[in-house]
Amino acid sequence: MTLPLHGLRVLDMASLAAGPLAATYLGEFGADVVKLEPPGVGDAIRGWGVQRDGVGVMWKSVARNKRSVTVDLRTPDGQDLARRLAASCDVVIANTRPATLRRWGLDHARLHADNPRLVMLHVTGFGLEGPKAERPGFGTVGEAMSGFAHLTGESGGPPTLPAFMLADGVASLTAAYAVMTALYERDARGGEGRLIDVNLVDPLARLIEQSLLTWDTTGVVPGRMGNRWDISAPRNTYRTADDRWIAMSGSAPTVALRVFRAIGRPDLAEDPDFADPQRRLARAGEVDAVVSEWVGRHTQDEAMAVFEAAEIAAGPVYTVADLVADEQMVAREVFRRVDDEELGSLLVQMPVPRLSGVEPRVDHLGPPLGAHTDEVLAEIGIDDAARADLRARGVI
């Protein structure tokens, strides 16, 4: 099958998570993604987290379907190679600080002059303009400064950071749709390429807009409420008799009333203090106590059977092992084991969006460092002798 982005060429010269993840999404739907890495050490994400036989498993997933090319961008010859590669590409992805890219001659102005149709995605900590534009930033900083950490955690407890790359992940999704928007304008509307400015704070801040609206309307700064949320009740996690957990949301008024009836409290569904959404919010603590007491007398399976029969928006709190075993995940083949030349195989999550008649592929997991250097440089006219010279001088 020819995938939707077949023929699209992407130069991924970013590092770590947000930029490379955006490139990964494009590669899953057929784009040819050329990944630039420093010779000898490679992308920093190769060293992240769990290693198997000295190989980082996170790298294996993030670099799926990409071709690895080693180029030292700190050298003039390496910068020239990157410009030549960019001239052959539709999309370039970078996350180096703006002043450094300008010094290297790899900023948008320079690359656009060589390739006016180029779409360039530049992911930074704080954006390409403003007083913090040149400051380094990582996802942790984005999670803190976006307002996310302030809202997360128990009341009275410390701000809480996620144990996964949330800010980078949200930024990468924002970046991927921005790239497709710019490509649509270029190809369907006859435009030129665009510079896309995505940072690690704004996309996550967009998702907690409720806090902004509440503060602007009432003057109140929302704070940490544990698993509650002051827009609906019940909304929490509840411990079961077998020491597991169930999460529940009563965001739709009819669902909240179903909860009361399902747990044997139809009286609350008729009581205006509990039936009316706004009045129920004022008594969220009492609602939680009623639901928690009922759930605590049942196992997770027993409680879920009642909630599912009553069409209540509730779900078990899964570990990763639970998630992989879930019948819905299995039926949809959300996770597949992919063969790998270094690790034998690895269980990875498949591409998330589903397009009718299209099956995005994981052709291979992250390649060994520099596995495609000769192949890719030959495609832009760098012959054997020139590559040998570059390799001898440590440029590639």
Image: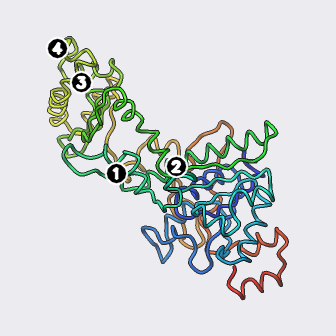
Q: Foreground mark, 3 or 4?
A: 3
- The residue pinned by badge 4 equals 267
Of pointers 2 and 3, the one earlier in the residue sequence: 2
Residue beneath disc 2:
171
CA gap, disc 2 to disc 3?
Answer: 33 Å
Judged left or right of residue 21, residue 36 is: right
Seen in the picture, residue 378 relative to 8 is either above or below; the reply is: below
Q: Amino acid at mark 4?
A: Asp
Where does label 1 land, which residue? 319
Quarter of the figure with residue 253: top left
> In this image, 158 relative to 124: left or right?
left
Q: Earlier in the sequence, mark 3 or mark 4?
A: 4
Residue 109, above or below 343: above
Quadrant showing the C terminus: bottom right
Q: CA gap, disc 3 to disc 4? A: 17 Å
Question: Which is closer to the viewer, label 1 or label 3?
Answer: 3
- Whole-percent x and y of residue 319? 34, 51
Sequence-wise, the earlier of marks 1 and 3 is 3
Which residue occupies 14% across, 32% down? 293
Q: CA distance from mark 2 to mark 1?
A: 25 Å
- Could you tell me the amino acid type at mark 2? Ala
| Distance Cα–Cα, label 4 vs label 1 | 35 Å
Judge depth for marks 2 and 1 and give the one in front.
2
Q: Is residue 238 left or right of residue 346?
A: left
- The correct choice, above or below, for 236 with respect to 96 in the image is above
Q: Horizontal and vertical percent for residue 133? A: 53, 56
Q: Three-letter amino acid code at disc 1?
A: Thr
Q: Secondary structure at mark 2?
A: helix
Mark 2–mark 3 CB contact (< 8 Å): no
On the image, numbered disc 3 is attached to which residue?
Answer: 281
Circle 4 sits in a helix, a strand or a loop, which is it? helix
